[in-house]
């Protein structure tokens, strides 16, 4: 997720809190094969380090063919031992408190930025991207018009890539038109269950990329 990717909007997958990596990883792999996925933000249900490392390695193995970057949500200390590509921080405070645990040279990004000031503070910290529009712990998110405004403002002024979270596939074209560098998808994809690959293919089409062959 670098400046080189700014020529076109790509997709980011945000996983639910994964409890069974063995069961989930094949579905994730199928989703990545079906769409243009630049990165996967992995959320884990466990806080046990040994169990987390095992789950991350299982997921990583299934992502190898897709070449999508693997970003660990709020687990910077596990990035290097797990061989992941970086860390995703769910809020600015978490990033400021724990980013020092992230190995040098790894990717990092931050969400949970309710104000323009917070977004600018995050950009000055040296992260590789900022995320706007994701749901909070209660499932609430900014209004869509406010999200479009935030993305457009950011794209007009800043070089740092921004990730815009789409609550549904219908939001993808507008976010791409607003010049989001990446569009993140969570429940909009996973709610499709066994039809997740078909949903990813549709998302790729909506973002303006050709559907990928199996």
Image (cartoon, grey):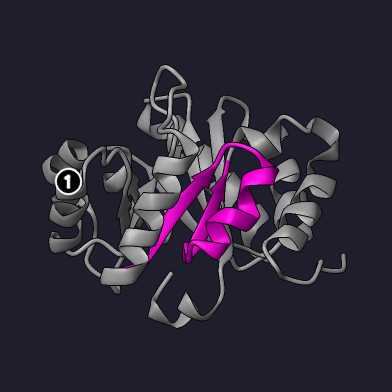
Residue plotted at (40% across, 75% down): 2
Residue 141 at x, y percent in the picture: 43, 30
Confirm whether the magenta stretch covers residue 171: yes
Residue 184 lies left or right of residue 190; in this view the side is left
Residue 204 at x, y percent in the picture: 72, 60
| Residue placed most toward the observer, 36 or 26 | 36
- Determine the secondary structure under disc 1: helix
Residue 120 lies left or right of residue 30; in this view the side is left
| Residue placed most toward the observer, 126 or 51 | 126
26, above or below 207, in the image: above
Which residue carries the number 1 mark?
118
Q: Quadrant of residue 65?
A: bottom right
Q: Report crowding for label 1: few under 14, some 14 to 19, many 20 or more residues within 10 A (C-alpha).
A: some
Instruction: Work out whether residue 85 can be spotted.
Output: yes
Q: How many marks?
A: 1
Confirm whether the magenta stretch covers residue 61: no
Residue 80 lies left or right of residue 63; in this view the side is left
12, above or below 23, in the image: below
Quadrant where the N terminus is found in the figure = bottom left
Residue 121 at x, y percent in the picture: 13, 53
- Please give the range of residues in magenta: 160-185
| Residue placed most toward the observer, 81 or 183 | 183
Instruction: Work out whether residue 78 can be spotted.
Output: no
Q: Outermost residue toward the top?
A: 138
158, above or below 44, in the image: below
């Amino acid at each position: 997720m670098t400046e080189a990717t700014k020529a076109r909007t790509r997709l980011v997958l945000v996983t639910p809190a994964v409890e069974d990596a063995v069961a989930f990883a094949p579905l994730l792999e199928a989703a990545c094969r079906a769409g243009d996925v630049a990165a996967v933000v992995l959320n884990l249900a466990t806080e046990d380090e040994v169990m987390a490392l095992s789950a991350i390695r299982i997921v990583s193995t299934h992502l190898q063919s897709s070449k999508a970057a693997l970003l660990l949500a709020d687990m910077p200390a596990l990035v290097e031992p797990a061989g992941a590509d970086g860390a995703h921080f769910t809020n600015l405070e978490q990033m400021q408190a724990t980013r020092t645990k992230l190995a040098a040279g790894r990717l990092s990004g931050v969400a949970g930025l309710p104000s323009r000031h917070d977004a600018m503070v995050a950009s000055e910290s040296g992260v590789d991207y900022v995320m706007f529009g994701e749901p909070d712990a209660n499932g609430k998110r900014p209004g869509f018009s406010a999200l479009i405004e935030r993305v457009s403002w950011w794209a007009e002024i800043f070089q740092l890539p921004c990730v815009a979270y789409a609550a549904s596939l219908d939001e993808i074209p507008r976010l791409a038109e607003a010049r989001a560098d990446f569009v993140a998808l969570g429940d909009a994809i996973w709610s499709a269950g066994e039809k997740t690959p078909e949903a990813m293919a549709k998302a790729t089409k909506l973002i303006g990329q050709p559907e990928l062959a199996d």
